[in-house]
Image (spheres, rainbow, N blue to C red):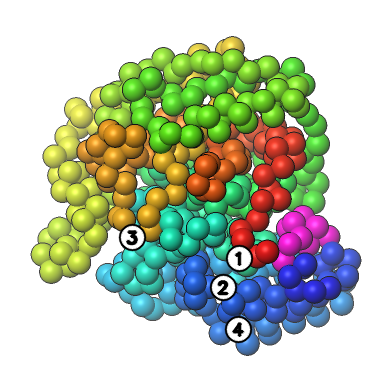
Amino acid sequence: MPSADLLELSATELSRRIAAREVSCREVMQASLARIEALNPRFNAIVSLRDPAQSLAEADERDAELARGERRGWMHGFPLAVKDLSHAAGLPTSMGSPLSPRSAARADSLHVARARAAGAVVIGKTNTPEFGLGSHTYNTVFGTTRNAYAPDRSAGGSSGGAAVALALGILPVADGSDMMGSLRNPAAFNNVIGMRPSRGRVPGNPDEELFFQQLGCEGPMARTVEDAARLLAVQAGFDTRVPLSSPHALPSPDELRLEGDGKGLRIGWLGSIWPDLPLEPGIRELGEKALGTFRDIGCEVEPCTLDVPREHNWSAWLRLRQLLVGGKLGAYLSDPKLFAQLKPEAQWEIEQSRHLDAASLYQASVYRSNVYRAFLKLFERFDFVLAPTAQVFPFDAELHWPAGVAGVKSDTYHRWMEIVTPFTLAGLPTLNVRAGFGEGGLPMGLQLAGPIHSDLDVLRLGHAYDQACGWAAHRPSVLA
């Protein structure tokens, strides 16, 4: 099978063909490595690439296992590049920072270990902004990742390298992480799928702080919703070392089924969520056009609002994020030379965290609780809610972040991604689905969210919509 055609297969179909020995793991690996050689110098999605000879040798081991009738799991023989905020044994974890050690990680992060156990072959890392801060993937270690559809534009972030690698066909699936839309925003910017699971669905790193880290999480990215669902099934599952991880089990990847339509399902269209939240012209229009596709598959759609003050949501977001980022990176403040090497956004988070007190953090948690209760009220009327994934289309890759949105000046480096924050605060399963392309030919997505722990229901509806909308067929011009 020609390598270009091999890379166009869905991960679900690729897994089936590998298991049936219609395609060898070596052929898949060769195709992936050839695509990296051809396109990565331009797009910079993959970093810390492993020696190709080692990756090919491991692919040969996977083929030998199949010849003996041994299949590790759904990802058997898949090339996998791990987001460079997570650990992959044998590769450095740079976190996009010049301050990170260059030594190789000695063990995998939990979700990476689960992917290896399911048969994946780790070939490298995917690029990310420094410490994952900011939804634009650039850093001083590896440089800027370029949008798959417009290389002069941002790939989004912080899972920008993963999204671009998927859009370019380099990887069949990819892991990512999400605090402020980092699985959703780059997926929207590159016309792929990204899902932030319910809080606790995918356990975090057992070696890190276990109780306060409730905003960030790992999750799946893919070119189809079905593939994302199967990767989630690999990543998910309770781990006793992570006490807040979810005990709700998912079907195995090979048993998972998403068939169905949207008949009778009620969807609330949040639009910009708050009337004064700015959106770049064209984004709302794309979203409202996509509502027609949801109606075509049987859904009932009507406008709704999230009954919580915008300023309360944003206040909670700032304080809780500063607590987490400042707590993790605050040690750099004691060394002026190291602190000076951090990106300004990291410096700002650390400095702001020093002004937090117990009362302000408690109030932030109260506001966060109110955001969750506002969603609960919506879910009394609706099965799901929808909103745009981002407030701007992919912007100039040379910028650090947009200075404003629709004429409204940004007062922080991340204000332009405010639209993702209520879903994070509420811990809801939130899936980026494709919304289409704006007048400039730039991609955009929609956030499809359901009640806590309704991950499979969100994926089923997302699957039905994605099959009906047809945007998956719109591939980057570099692949034409």
Q: Which residue has dot 3 on it?
A: 398
Badge nearest the viewer, 4 or 1 = 1
Tell me which residue sits at (59%, 15%) in the image: 302
Contact between labelled residues 3 and 2, with CB atoms less than 8 Å apart: no
Sequence-first disc among 4 and 2:
2
Q: Which residue has dot 1 on it?
A: 478
Disc 3 to disc 4, C-alpha distance: 31 Å
Sequence-first disc among 4 and 1:
4
Q: Which residue has dot 4 on it?
A: 52
**Image location (x, y in percent) of residue 115:** 63, 61
Name the quarter where the N terminus is drawn: bottom right
Residue 39, labelled with which disc? 2
Whether residue 374 is situated above or below residue 93 in the rendered picture: above
Residue 298 seen in this snapshot: yes
Question: Which quarter of the figure has residue 419?
Answer: top left
Badge nearest the viewer, 1 or 2 = 1
Contact between labelled residues 2 and 1, with CB atoms less than 8 Å apart: yes
Q: Residues within 10 Å of mark 2 (few under 14, many from 20)?
A: some
Please give left or right for residue 185 compared with residue 27 in the image.
Answer: left
Tell me which residue sits at (75%, 79%) in the image: 26
- The residue tagged with tag 3: helix, strand or loop? loop
Q: Which residues are magenta?
A: 7-16
